[in-house]
Amino acid sequence: MADLLREIPVFLFYFKIGHIRNDMAKYIFVTGGVTSSLGKGIIAASLAKLLQARGFTVTIQKLDPYINVDPGTLNPYEHGECYVTNDGAETDLDLGHYERFLGIPTSQANNVTTGRIYQTVINKEREGAYLGKTVQVIPHITDEIKRRITLLGQDNKFDIIITEIGGTVGDIESLPYIESIRQMQWEMGRENCVVVHLTLIPYLKAAKELKTKPTQHSVKLMNENGLAPDIIVCRTEEPINGDIKRKIALFCNVTTDAVIEAADADTIYDVPLLMMRENLDVIVLDKLKMNLRHEPDLKQWKEFLNKLKNPTKTVNIGLVGKYVELQDAYKSILEAFVHAGAMNECKVKVHNVHSEYLTPENVKSSLSGLDGILVAPGFGNRGIEGKIEAIKYAREHKIPFFGICLGMQCCVIEFARNVLKLEAANSTEMDIHTPYPVIDLMENQKNIIQMGGTMRLGAYDCEIENNTLAFKVYEKNFISERHRHRWEFNNSFIEQFEKAGMKFSGKNPNSGLVEIIELTHHPFFIGAQFHPELKSTVENPHPLFKYFVKAALENKN
């Protein structure tokens, strides 16, 4: 009798968990092994797309093991672009893939770093929330990780939540995340928490063999930490035959059908179809004990791929920036060109132009032959004069031009210097003593010094004037776009600029801050204070990129 009574609390615990799971989200965890940069984000986004196409509501989140609180203060050379969400969160660039694939916005809850986890726990400890107990990785850090993971699933908004774990299994900084997943599987049951492990099957040319040993070691490391994969996705340059799949299954303790081939693809947008061919979504749903509902509806996705792979035209766009050595620094811009190119049934060839090395002497040779010029966003003084030279060249030679954020601000500086003849005009970000601060901080910003707290972050409204290029592009008067900057156009100069031919076609309806500038005597010249690339998706290319590519095509012809 005593033994039976001891078992009752355990029975009630599992009954409660099982009961809760009937009407809450299920979880898929995507981990990585062997090496970084295998494409966990693309696999996660592709799986999410397939599940979404079957009628499930899905979202994806990224857990990053670095101690920075967010990517907002990270150098682009360190971590690529900082992706900004509607609610103003500065997040990992993988959230861009999630939005581009799924076509739904993410938020602060979709990206968590170790720094944010520890910051929360330490703040609670300082407030006395732990009642003087010793604060430890287990259970306090792991409890906070689990709380963050399940945050998106608490309002029954999603059927499935996919969580990508940054880094690779075996990294010291990843251990608390692996332990948290282990705990969640124990608490919720493996039918509610599935682990997809992405690994590498290298091909040794000398031996002409695919090698499974790195995958075996990666799974062994995971097993040593109490976690086992349910599905293994194998990145490979060569096809994986049945023998290799059976070998991986045998040594890694998964079923043979749960060993998935992920061959190198021509484009990341091929990956959902490749994963569908491998039945990844079917296997995941089976392990989650969920019905298939119906076949994935990917008609629009396939139409996009057909246009992407069968362009009828080519256009050459110059991307002028100071981080061009690292393509991830402009990831969303490059993907927006892919979307806009497919919409225009043309291939967009992006030519990187390093603004730091652009001078009045070489600007013509560097930019001639381009059908359009985009000046990219950025921070700091380096490379600014090269951007201004590129803008002057585009303005004077009537080349379609598009400036984003700092690129738009450089348009203002160039116009002030060379058209208004305010030769020392500048932004106070670059020259605090400029006599003509055409770009300046707002008064309520000037005393704020905390990094990572830049003033305009996230979605802000913009009102567009009729009979302008911006209205032609958007075909409506009110839009919302995402921002990430502190400096603004100085409205005290508006009258001078408008008399000389610069039009301020978009403004924030509440503050009057300038959002869009354009030139009236130019075939296509537009600058946006916001970041339109952050809202471009496969199925809804951003109109500014779509029209810019169209203008570049017309210029070429």
Image: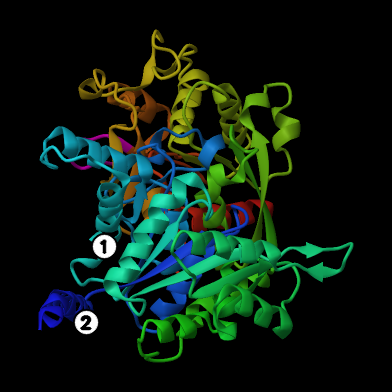
Whole-number angstrom distance, CA of label 1 to CA of label 2: 15 Å
**410 or 556: nearer the viewer:** 410
Question: On the picture, is 363 further left or further right than 427?
Answer: right
Q: 62 above or below 513?
A: below
Q: Is disc 1 placed on a helix, strand or loop?
A: helix
Instruction: Give amino acid for label 1.
Output: Thr
Instruction: Give amino acid for label 2.
Output: Asn
* Quadrant, the N terminus: bottom left
Q: Which residue is mark 2?
A: 22
Q: Is disc 2 placed on a helix, strand or loop?
A: loop
Asked whether residue 264 appears in the rendered view, the answer is no
Question: On the picture, is 64 further left or further right than 303?
Answer: left
Q: 93 above or below 489?
A: below
Local packing at callout 1 (Cα closer than 10 Å; few below 14, some 14-19, many 20+) is some
Q: Which residue is mark 1?
A: 150
Which residue is at 15% across, 79% downward?
3
Question: On the picture, is 297 further left or further right than 192?
Answer: right
Which residue is at 52% across, 67% downward?
197
**39 or 422: nearer the viewer:** 39
Q: Which mark is residue 543?
A: none
**Lower sequence index among marks 1 and 2:** 2
Local packing at callout 2 (Cα closer than 10 Å; few below 14, some 14-19, many 20+) is few
Q: Is residue 89 magenta?
A: no
- In the image, residue 5 lies at what x, y percent? 10, 79
**425 or 35: nearer the viewer:** 35
Q: Which region of the structure is painted magenta?
A: 507-514
